[in-house]
Image (tube, grey):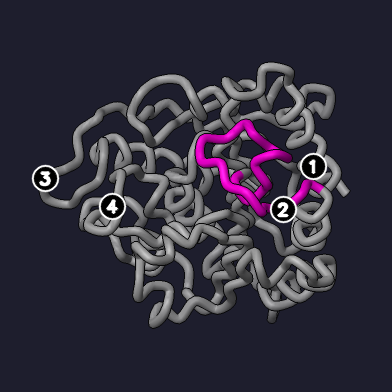
């Protein structure tokens, strides 16, 4: 039986300045308010700085390490207490800390990664140095030593138990090559693979794979998996993404699974949602799937 859904805000933005996705947790709480979910408050470490580390190429690296440590501790505590954390972002930079915390509390876990990108940059290949470029690479141990110490034993998630769903950025694929080849990632469903597929069946097959032999898993949701016309309240807008209905179909079997240990929702920028439409749609999606 799954524990009660418990919100944890992670108000960060990897661009290194205030505003943007830092404001996501507060805005999403307002949209989720009537659901009366348990709430564990916010993490405290922000990301500040516009200079890339001269050795590893990461932007605001010390802040990211501190944030990762804090998120890891908070998530581990919630899961140990029998809660199901729902992390409200913030940007994808929080993902390694979240997975490390869940792993600490439950042992080996899997990952369903819903994102318009593969997030497999390193400090040498990233065009920006922002922490949001690196989450999957960091989970696999492709990160600076201080970051690996912050997440603990690596890989944080066995690559064979990672499913990457919805990526569609060809520029990213060109820059990270030859990745993702050779990393042993269990399943990659590019956006083109999903365009005419039975999405509910794909969601069910992902859930079955990730819960094999009673295993637990985490769900990551970056809203840039959605089409830019469907969801313009994010910073990296791309065409040809999913609709809310498509995302709901593939996400629902995972979100309702007893094997789900936690969820994070990232890259919602309420500064681009003046009428509140995107925040309301995102809150509705979370409640319809997670509370089912």
Sequence order check: which comes first, mark 2 or mark 3? 3
Task: Give 171 or 259, whichever is nearer the viewer.
Answer: 171
The mark that comes first in sequence, 4 or 1, is 4
Task: Please state if 200 lies on the left or on the right of 88 as rendered.
Answer: right
**Badge 3: residue crowd in 10 Å (few <14, some 14–19, many ≥20):** few
Say which residue label 1 marks. Answer: 285
Q: CA distance from mark 2 to mark 4?
A: 32 Å
Number of other residues with Cα within 10 Å of mark 2, as a class: few under 14, some 14 to 19, many 20 or more:
many
Choose top left, top right, bottom left or bottom right for residue 14.
Answer: top left
Q: Which stretch is magenta? A: 224-244
Residue at the image position 61 percent from the left and 68 percent from the top: 190
Work out whether residue 185 or residue 126 is closer to the camera in this orientation and state it. 126
Residue 234 in the image: state x and y as whole percent: 57, 35
Dot 4: element? helix
**What distance separates the C-alpha of mark 1 from that of mark 3?**
41 Å
Instruction: Give the alpha-carbon distance from disc 3 to disc 4, as whole Å.
Output: 15 Å
Label pair 2/4, CB-CB below 8 angstroms: no
Q: Is residue 253 above or below residue 283?
A: below
Q: Identify the residue at the far left of this view.
A: 54
Residue 217 visible to the viewer: no
Residue 242 marker: 2
Is label 2 or label 4 in front? 2
Q: Nearer the viewer, mark 1 or mark 2?
A: 2
Look at the image and tell me in which quarter the N terminus lies. bottom right
| Residue 34 image position (x, y, % from top left) | 84, 23
Q: Check if mark 3's residue and mark 4's residue have beta carbons within 8 Å.
A: no
Of badges 3 and 4, the one in the foreground is 3
Q: Residues within 10 Å of mark 4 (few under 14, many from 20)?
A: many
Mark 1 or mark 2, which has the lower sequence index?
2
Helix, strand or loop for disc 1: helix
């Amino acid at each position: 039986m799954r524990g009660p859904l418990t919100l944890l805000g992670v108000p960060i933005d990897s661009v290194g300045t205030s505003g943007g996705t830092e404001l996501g947790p507060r805005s999403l709480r307002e949209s989720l308010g009537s659901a009366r979910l348990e709430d564990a408050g916010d993490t405290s470490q922000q990301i500040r700085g516009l200079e890339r580390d001269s050795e590893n190429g990461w932007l605001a690296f010390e802040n990211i390490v501190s944030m990762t440590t804090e998120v890891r501790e908070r998530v581990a505590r919630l899961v140990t207490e029998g809660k199901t954390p729902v992390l409200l972002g913030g940007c994808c930079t929080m993902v390694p800390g979240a997975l490390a915390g869940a792993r600490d509390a439950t042992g080996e876990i899997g990952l369903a990664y819903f994102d318009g990108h593969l997030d497999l940059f390193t400090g040498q290949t990233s065009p920006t140095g922002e922490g949001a470029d690196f989450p999957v690479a960091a989970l696999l141990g492709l990160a600076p030593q201080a970051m690996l110490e912050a997440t603990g034993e690596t890989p944080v998630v066995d690559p064979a138990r990672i499913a990457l769903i919805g990526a569609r950025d060809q520029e990213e694929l060109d820059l990270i090559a030859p990745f993702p080849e050779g990393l042993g990632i269990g399943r990659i469903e590019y956006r083109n693979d999903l365009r005419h597929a039975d999405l509910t069946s794909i969601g069910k097959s992902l859930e079955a794979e990730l819960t094999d032999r009673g295993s637990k898993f985490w769900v990551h949701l970056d809203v840039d998996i959605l089409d830019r016309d469907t969801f313009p309240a994010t910073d990296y807008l791309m065409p040809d993404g999913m609709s809310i209905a498509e995302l709901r179909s593939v996400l629902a079997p995972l979100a309702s699974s007893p094997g789900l240990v936690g969820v994070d929702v990232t890259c919602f920028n309420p500064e681009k949602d003046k009428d509140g439409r995107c925040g309301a749609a995102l809150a509705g999606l979370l409640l319809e799937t997670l509370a089912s």
